Image (cartoon, grey):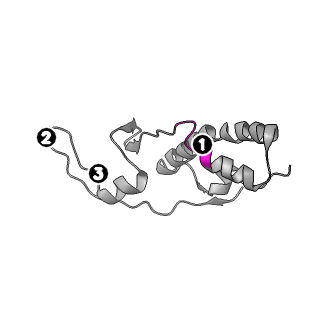
Amino acid sequence: MTTYTAAAPERKRVTITSKRQFTIPQKFYSALGFDRDAICTLGDGFLIIEPVSRVPDGEYATQILAELIAEGYSGQELLAEFKTRQARIRPAVEAMLESARMVAEGKGEYLKYEDVFDTKKEEK
């Protein structure tokens, strides 16, 4: 597995209002894909705010099918391989979120996309 050490995180000072509110800088908001909800995690002297992931099970279905067809799958073999690959999506996303959380806490290292999704071409 290839790992990368974490670069210094980008930081920005924000003001907290009397109602305990603050604005997430636009650059951070966009880069992390925030929507209407966030998850706050309290640590030992720190707070992590991360976007709520909403990845429906079928969101990547079109991409998965296109890749399988391009690889020559068809019929029942296509269906079986589709189910196998689709089942990998949620665990892969959860692994990425956990990895990001560990990096944010200074306890982990960055991983490449290929490491998380195990995109090595499989032989049929």
Q: Pick whichever, 59 or 111, lies toward us.
A: 59
Mark 2 Cα-neighbour bin, 10 Å: few <14, some 14–19, many ≥20: few
Q: Position of residue 111 (x, y in %)?
A: 61, 55
**Residue displayed at 62% across by 56% down:** 113
Mark 3 Cα-neighbour bin, 10 Å: few <14, some 14–19, many ≥20: some
Q: Position of residue 1 (x, y in %)?
A: 72, 55
Q: Which residue is mark 3?
A: 24
The secondary structure type at the circle numbered 3 is loop
**Residue type at the position of mark 2:** Ser
**Residue type at the position of mark 3:** Ile
**Residue displayed at 47% across by 50% down:** 104
The secondary structure type at the circle numbered 2 is loop
Q: Quadrant of residue 57?
A: top right
- Residue 92 drawn in magenta: no
Image position of 68 (left or right of 77): left
Tell which tag, 3 or 2, sits nearer the viewer.
3
Q: Position of residue 26 (x, y in %)?
A: 30, 57
Q: CA distance from mark 1 to mark 2?
A: 36 Å
The range drawn in magenta is 56-62
99, above or below 112, in the image: above
Tell which tag, 1 or 2, sits nearer the viewer.
1
| Precedes in sequence: disc 1 or disc 3 | 3
**Residue type at the position of mark 1:** Ala
Q: Pick whichever, 50 or 69, lies toward us.
A: 69
Q: Quadrant of residue 38?
A: top left
- Image disc number at residue 95: 1
Q: CA distance from mark 3 to mark 2?
A: 16 Å
76, above or below 31, in the image: above
Q: Which residue is mark 2?
A: 18
Q: Position of residue 71 (x, y in %)?
A: 77, 54
